[in-house]
Image (cartoon, coloured by chain):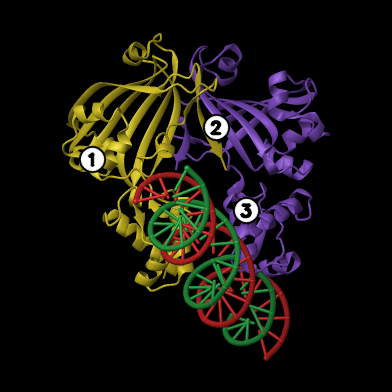
Chain colours: A yellow, B purple, C red, D green
DNA sequence: ATTTTTAAGTCTTATATAAGATATATAAGA
DNA sequence: TCTTATATATCTTATATAAGACTTAAAAAT
């Protein structure tokens, strides 16, 4: 049997998955939760502590505990690791290049845990920094989870994909795994990014997950690292 | 004034810096610490919880709380992010290419927080995986912190630098920041790694820190990512 | 009378302490 | 070898106090 606080954590997560509390909103106070789960405040606290450490919940002293949302200032570019090497702070801009539906390859189906050859939405876009192309993104998501996803919607949201997933489709992106490689720019990438063919570029392959480690998105980012770098911390 | 548990955390850290408890050894029990610091067990617990989350301490139920050490199985390759894309598990091998002392450049001095043009030890090595070269490492550390560091010592320790720092010099590597770029292999890198000049390779620039965010090492890794990738998690 | 400021009260999380039950690991003894 | 004792961290509950955020009521100023 799991410790009580783990069980409480699970029940809170279930409420989040079930949509009982929505992103940006506050959940009941610790004492209220303690009553409704019939445990002590300390146990609820420990459960919430862990969820806050996972950035699923956000505690604000004096105000309450809130469901994390991509519609918040500090959360906007949480998953963007590419940084200007000069400390520049220019805004990223977004341009949609392509939008189509296609059959998932076997590999992709496996990654997204969907049936072989089921439909995925495939999105191609370029992010520009300081008017210069910086990242060429290829994004694939299961069509079944994102019914009603259109190019217009992406343009309207200015490329904040995770905000759109959350607001328009009720899907919370919580964490991701990335595989990084150095590759040579092919024809297409070279043209779009405005560099010579075979220029070394950074290939960042991402799988994004929602609650319970359910994969919701596959993404390949091709980045120029002439004046930028991918920043990480090792702990 | 900081909360009590933060003050306790600081005092525990001071004991670690001061060498009162050594890596691999256990620290006093929570109750003993509570008595000696004149606070409750819960307060000590919260301090230790945070230090354990930072991987500075390691809790083992029924045994005690231990000072993290690089001389431990699961901690051996904790900072190696490069993984075989095929799931291979071959052992890495290590070959020392060069060892010399030199004057620190201005940039390096700033990073390592040492006087301009003070002496640093510069180490060049290559890591091979499955008999094939995989990573070309260039490592620079302040000579003053590592008196008595010799090529023999590195060879003897088979390239486990952080184990050597800990065991032979009493310096604990705790965390690091990395900047990743895609670059073209130059003459030297191409030759050592056994690839054509201008092959795209991954450049991983690392600054490693000990207690209190004191920088102890600068490192540049040039990695082949034909069959390997750099793996990260985003939270 | 109206507005502004201040104070008090209330809700929240954060911090701190205490105490007991439980799980795990090791050592000592039968 | 098996059992028991002991030490440890872990989990759970309970009770305070502190501190931040907000609301409301009262007081002061205009």
Q: Residues within 10 Å of mark 3 (few under 14, many from 20)?
A: some
Residue A21 seen in the current view: yes
Residue B185, given in percent of the width and then of the height, sits at: 54, 15
Q: In this rendered view, identify the residue nearer to me: A99 or B90.
A: A99
- Under tag 2, what secondary structure? strand
Q: Is residue A74 above or below residue B33?
A: above
In the rendering, which numbered label is found on residue B129?
2
- The quadrant of the rendering that contains the N terminus of chain A is bottom left
Q: Chain of mark 3?
A: B
- Under tag 3, what secondary structure? helix
- The quadrant of the rendering that contains the C terminus of chain A is top right
* B171 left or right of D26 in image: right
Q: In this rendered view, identify the residue nearer to me: B94 or C11.
A: C11
Pointer 2 with pointer 1, Cβ within 8 A: no
- Under tag 1, what secondary structure? helix
Residue B97 seen in the current view: no
- Give the Cα distance between marks 2 and 1: 47 Å
Which residue lies under the disc numbered 1?
A168
- Corner quadrant of residue D4: bottom right
Q: Residue at x 35, y 22 (%)?
A: A93
Q: Chain of mark 1?
A: A
- Give the Cα distance between marks 3 and 2: 34 Å
Residue A105, given in percent of the width and then of the height, sits at: 24, 33
Q: Chain of mark 2?
A: B
Q: Residues within 10 Å of mark 1 (few under 14, many from 20)?
A: some
């Amino acid at each position: 049997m799991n410790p009580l606080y783990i069980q409480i954590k699970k029940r809170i997560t279930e409420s989040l998955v079930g949509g009982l509390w929505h992103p940006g909103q506050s959940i009941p106070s610790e004492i209220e939760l303690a009553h409704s789960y019939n445990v002590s405040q300390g146990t609820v606290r420990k459960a919430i502590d862990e969820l806050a450490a996972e950035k699923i919940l956000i505690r604000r002293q004096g105000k309450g505990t809130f469901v994390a949302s991509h519609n918040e200032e500090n959360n906007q570019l949480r998953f963007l690791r590419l940084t200007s090497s000069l400390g520049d702070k220019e805004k990223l801009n977004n341009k949609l290049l392509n939008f189509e539906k296609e059959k998932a390859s076997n590999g992709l189906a496996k990654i997204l845990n969907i049936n072989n050859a089921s439909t995925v939405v495939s999105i191609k876009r370029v992010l520009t920094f300081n008017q210069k192309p910086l990242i060429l993104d290829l994004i694939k998501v299961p069509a079944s989870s994102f019914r009603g996803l259109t190019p217009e919607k992406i343009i309207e949201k200015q490329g904040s994909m995770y905000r759109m997933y959350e607001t328009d489709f009720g899907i919370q992106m919580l964490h991701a795994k990335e595989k990084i490689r150095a590759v040579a720019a092919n024809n297409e990438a070279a043209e779009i990014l405005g560099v010579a063919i075979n220029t070394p570029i950074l290939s960042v392959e991402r799988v994004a997950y929602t609650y319970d480690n359910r994969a919701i998105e596959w993404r390949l980012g091709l980045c120029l690292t002439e004046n930028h770098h991918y920043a990480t911390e090792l702990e």
